[in-house]
Image (tube, rainbow, N blue to C red):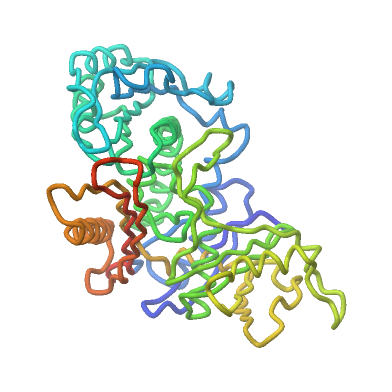
Amino acid sequence: MDSRTVGVLTDGTGTVRASAYGFDVDRRTSIAEVLDTLLQCVSAESIGYVMITGLAEIASAPWHERLSPVGALRLAAPATLSVPPLSGWPSEKAAAVRDSVAVVAGGHQYDGTEVSALDETAVAAFAHRCRNRVAAVAITGANAQVDSGHEQRAAAIAREVLGESVPVVTSSGLGGMGLLERENTTVLDAALSPHISLLLDGVTQLLRAKEVTADIYFTSADGTLLTASDVARHPLRARRAARGAAITGALRLAALDDAVVVEAIDGYVYITTVVEGTPQENLGPVQVQGVRTCLPEVRTSAVRIDELRTRGTVARPSGDARLALRRARAGHGALPVIVVGPDADEVIRLDDGDNEIRPGFGARVGAIGAALGEVSGTVDRIFRFTETSYPDCVAQARRMARESAIQAGADPSRLRRPRVREFPLTYISTRCARMRVTVSGPLVRV
């Protein structure tokens, strides 16, 4: 299929009022073409928000050419010295990123006690070595998801030395248990941030040239929206955003929160289970271009579209497709199946009953999902039950997620019920648990 930029214009009720296509001669020309068409239907000043999906550049090959040199600082000595930062990276990516690397005293244990006091002198010396050498700095503290104080102090020292023009990315908001995976994610975010910042500046300038001054949001892999500042600090959150937008578009068009979404595009169908408006996730380590990260990933099965192509009235999907659909529904009953995407017409009936929905809109479904997406706030960290009770910790996690969603722009009066996932840490003597809590809701209408 043709590579095109797709745009839609929706009103306050979520109804699509106009759509436009721009052929990607180059990205900027295509976006401008789409904007010109949509602005024929509405004035620039009446646009409340601009949502963008598909920052595909962050995953384009050769990927290492998108990476900038980074100063990688780990706060964990005297622990962890046997495995330095960037261990296990593919050589070409490590070579593109590695500049100043150090492990200094600091960090915390699982129970919140210090591994050692933060060595502020060593942090300052590291920052001075980075001057005029790196495009960004990544700081990772041992168990910063329990106590981020050392990371915050080290980041403040780095900014004092390097100035505000050099991004300083910390790991505490990423979640996950593994130090190396969290560190790898932080380093990748830092290495991508200068490239992504240029892209964001270009998009902003283009919108402002069209006199569009609305706030800009970007879709994430689970279909929720990210602020431009979120994407600038943590570009990997926008990875696989186009699929997340398609999932959201399918749900909104079908007016459902629980379904199996089947997106047909580029020769494949992608099958994803959605419960309470949230795609099911794999929370184990995720490989990104050969680097182990702590990114959550939407659980999706891929099947070649040839196995689902219409072959007459008796045609049925092959065993692989049936198995993928059964796995998607496992434990959730007879969820409806929503079939969307530019190649949806090539997919034969997947459901033997009347439980299949095809809302149409073809290639526009992702743009619709971006336009109708919600913002979310997520807390993923370890909570200790030593000083406060378990119910108090759950309430604190929900409150923090709620505040994060509101800060991102969610309407406080329309927030969804918090989604809480708990992971007991039975191998730790201190009473504690990892909690991942997400609160989402529509943007405040302007």
The C terminus lies in quadrant: bottom left
Between residue 252 and residue 278, name the one nearer to us. 278
Residue 191 sits in which quadrant? top left
Which of 416 and 76 lies nearest the eye of the viewer? 76
Q: Is residue 157 above or below residue 203?
A: above
Quarter-of-image position of residue 164: top left
Q: Residue furthest bottom?
A: 354
- Residue sitting at x 27%, y 68%: 444
Q: Residue at x 72, y 60 (%)?
A: 303
The image shows residue 270 at horizontal and vertical percentages of 64, 61
User: Residue placed at 62% from the left, 64% from the top?
Assistant: 271
The percent position of residue 427, horizontal first and vertical second, equals 35, 42
Which residue is painted at 30% across and 24% down in the image? 76
Looking at the picture, how far across and down is residue 15, in whole percent?
45, 79
Residue 241 locus on image (x, y percent):
51, 54
User: In which quadrant will I find the N terminus?
Assistant: bottom right
Q: Is residue 141 visible?
A: yes
Residue 275 lies, with reference to residue 3, above or below; the image says below
Looking at the image, residue 313 sits to the left or right of residue 344; the answer is right
Q: Is residue 47 left or right of residue 63?
A: left
| 341 and 273: which is toward the camera | 273
- Determine whether, in the image, residue 310 is placed left or right of residue 374: right
- Total numbered labels placed on residues in the image: 0
Report the residue that reaches farthest toward the left. 387
Q: Nearer the viewer, residue 387 or 42?
A: 387
